[in-house]
Image (spheres, rainbow, N blue to C red):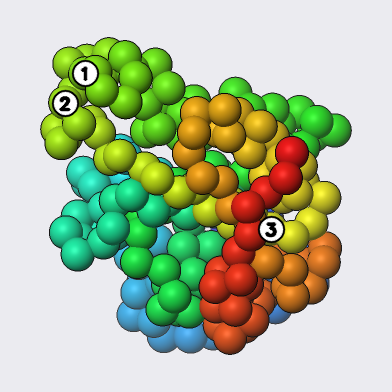
């Protein structure tokens, strides 16, 4: 155990993903050595980030109050929706420059063993965007939203861009079964991505090709 205020810092650093106890200790002692202004800059950046970052009310991407940058961009095609697990996946897809639609962030994937079901993900919010509870394609939505009103996006294709691992595939199949009957085209990014992998680690070219080669999902 380190003395005084050093141990709480080691404990907190050790809770970060990918940081083991040894790394936590090394980082803490590094911060002990650096000039105070350097350490303050790090502390301030964390505080400022936590104060100003919110989730987009529409797609649950990170935002700074209100809608995120993607949802605010009028040049994006609102009829194309890319469903991802994590806001980081939006960065990966954006880097490919192959997608000009909007996103929906689930904030996870189905994982029954860890107690993650549809209710723990932004599934209900996704279905609301597809206007499942609305009065149908010709009518007004439940809140009186008209087809070109604020609540309506007229989504024509949903691209399931969850990770190519067990949980991601199960989530894609689950969503496809829900969305298909609504007459909305459902596609899944093509294989070519390493199976069992994470979108985060896919290079732009591979992910770009996987998007281009997306196929209707058979359920
Ligand atoms: Zn958004």
Which residue is at a point 72% across and 45% down the rendered structure image? 218
Helix, strand or loop at label 3? It is loop
The residue pinned by badge 2 equals 146
Q: Earlier in the sequence, mark 2 or mark 1?
A: 1
Q: Tell whether label 2 touches label 3 (CB within 8 Å).
A: no
Q: Tell whether label 1 touches label 2 (CB within 8 Å).
A: yes
Between 87 and 19, the one lying in front of the other is: 87
Q: Position of residue 142 (x, y in %)?
A: 27, 13
Q: Tell whether label 1 touches label 3 (CB within 8 Å).
A: no
207 relative to 110, above or below: below
Which residue is at a point 37% across and 33% down the rendered structure image? 129
Q: Earlier in the sequence, mark 3 or mark 1?
A: 1
34 relative to 212, above or below: below
The residue pinned by badge 3 equals 163
Q: Is residue 214 left or right of residue 71?
A: right
Quarter of the figure with the N terminus? bottom right
Residue 214, picture quadrant: bottom right
The tag on residue 90 is: none
State whether residue 169 appears in this view.
yes
Q: Position of residue 144 (x, y in %)?
A: 17, 16
Q: Position of residue 19 (x, y in %)?
A: 72, 67
The residue pinned by badge 1 equals 140
């Amino acid at each position: 155990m380190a003395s005084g205020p050093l141990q709480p810092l080691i404990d907190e650093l050790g809770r970060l993903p990918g940081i083991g106890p040894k790394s936590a200790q090394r980082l803490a002692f590094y911060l002990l050595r650096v000039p105070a202004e350097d350490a303050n800059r790090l502390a301030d950046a964390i505080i400022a980030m936590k104060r100003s970052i919110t989730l987009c009310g529409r797609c649950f991407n990170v935002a700074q109050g209100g809608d995120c940058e993607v949802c605010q961009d009028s040049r994006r095609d609102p009829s194309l929706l890319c469903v991802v697990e994590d806001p980081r996946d939006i960065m990966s897809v954006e880097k490919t420059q192959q997608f000009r639609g909007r996103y929906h962030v689930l904030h996870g994937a189905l994982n029954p063993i860890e107690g993650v079901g549809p209710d723990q993900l932004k599934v209900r919010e996704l279905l609301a965007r597809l206007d499942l509870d609305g009065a149908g394609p010709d009518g007004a939505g439940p809140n009186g939203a008209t087809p070109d009103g604020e609540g309506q996006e007229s989504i024509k294709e949903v691209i399931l861009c969850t990770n190519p691992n067990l949980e991601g595939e199960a989530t894609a199949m689950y969503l496809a079964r829900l969305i298909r009957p609504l007459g909305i085209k459902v596609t899944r990014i093509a294989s070519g991505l390493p199976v069992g992998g994470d979108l985060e680690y896919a290079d732009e070219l591979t992910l770009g090709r996987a998007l281009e080669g997306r196929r209707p999902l058979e359920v």
